[in-house]
Image (cartoon, rainbow, N blue to C red):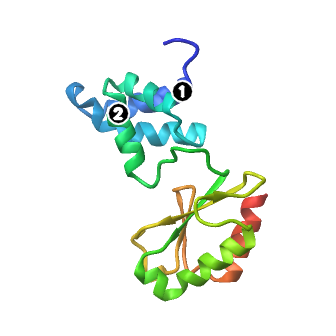
């Protein structure tokens, strides 16, 4: 591989482990994992990185782009260091989701799909996260579920993430 690749050798090894889970003629099955690995390393998935994944896996770049733009967990534009996804589905909405979203937006001074001036936080809307009984819920960087988000819990979360 050329030295001008965007993906590190470590990321390529992780993608290779994902590719090994599938038959050789079904390498495209690892595309979601490859996108996650690339995003974990770069923070977002610019077109050049999607192309690199497509070339590495051996599938059309447009097919990689279709996956990257279909799912909410992939960032196809730069995001803050911490992406906070607020569940806006009805159960969360009825259990304080509107209040939680309003408080978060007020504290950070940004709306949905916006990033704070310091580049630390981006807020996005999300669909059901499968934790309706824990409403309102938020997801941090696609990995950490935060439940029963009262104003105090939101304040504590933001303070923790700022450190």
In the picture, the disc for residue 50 is none
Residue that label 1 marks: 7
In the rendered image, which quarter contains the C terminus?
bottom right
Horizontal arrangement in the rendering, residue 140 relative to residue 58 (left or right): right
Q: Report the residue marked by disc 2.
A: 62
Crowdedness of circle 2 by 10 Å Cα count: few (<14), some, many (20+)?
Answer: few
Q: Is residue 109 left or right of residue 136?
A: right
Whole-Å distance between the Cαs marked 1 and 2? 19 Å
Q: Secondary structure at mark 1?
A: loop
* 46 left or right of 68 in image: right
Report x, y in % for residue 28. 29, 33
Q: Residue 159 at x, y = what percent?
A: 77, 67
Identify which residue is drawn at 48% across, 80% down.
Answer: 134
Where in the figure is residue 137, as x and y percent of width and height? 52, 74
The residue that appears at 39% across and 23% down in the rendered structure is 56
How many numbered marks have been drawn onto this rendered protein structure? 2
Q: Is residue 17 above or below residue 143?
A: above
Q: Residues within 10 Å of mark 1 (few under 14, many from 20)?
A: some
Residue at horizontal 56 percent and vertical 82 percent from the top: 98
Q: Is residue 2 above or below residue 23?
A: above
* Location of residue 13 with respect to 33 vertically, above or below: above
Q: Is residue 132 above or below residue 18?
A: below
Q: Nearer the viewer, mark 1 or mark 2?
A: 2
Task: Tell me which residue sits at (47%, 81%) in the image.
Answer: 92
């Amino acid at each position: 591989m050329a030295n001008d690749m965007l993906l590190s050798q470590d990321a390529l090894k992780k993608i290779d482990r994902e590719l090994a889970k599938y038959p050789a003629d079904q390498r495209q099955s690892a595309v979601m994992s490859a996108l996650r690995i690339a995003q974990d390393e770069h923070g977002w998935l610019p077109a050049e990185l999607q192309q690199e994944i497509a070339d590495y896996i051996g599938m059309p770049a447009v097919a990689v782009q279709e996956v990257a733009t279909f799912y909410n967990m992939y960032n196809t534009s730069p995001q803050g260091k911490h992406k906070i996804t607020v569940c806006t589905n009805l159960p969360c909405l009825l259990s304080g989701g509107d209040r939680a979203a309003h408080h978060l937006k007020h504290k950070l001074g940004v709306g949905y799909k916006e990033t704070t001036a310091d580049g630390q936080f981006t807020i996005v809307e999300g669909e059901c996260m499968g934790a309706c009984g824990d409403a309102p819920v938020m997801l941090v960087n696609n990995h950490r579920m935060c439940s029963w988000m009262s104003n105090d819990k939101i304040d504590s979360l933001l303070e923790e993430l700022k450190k």
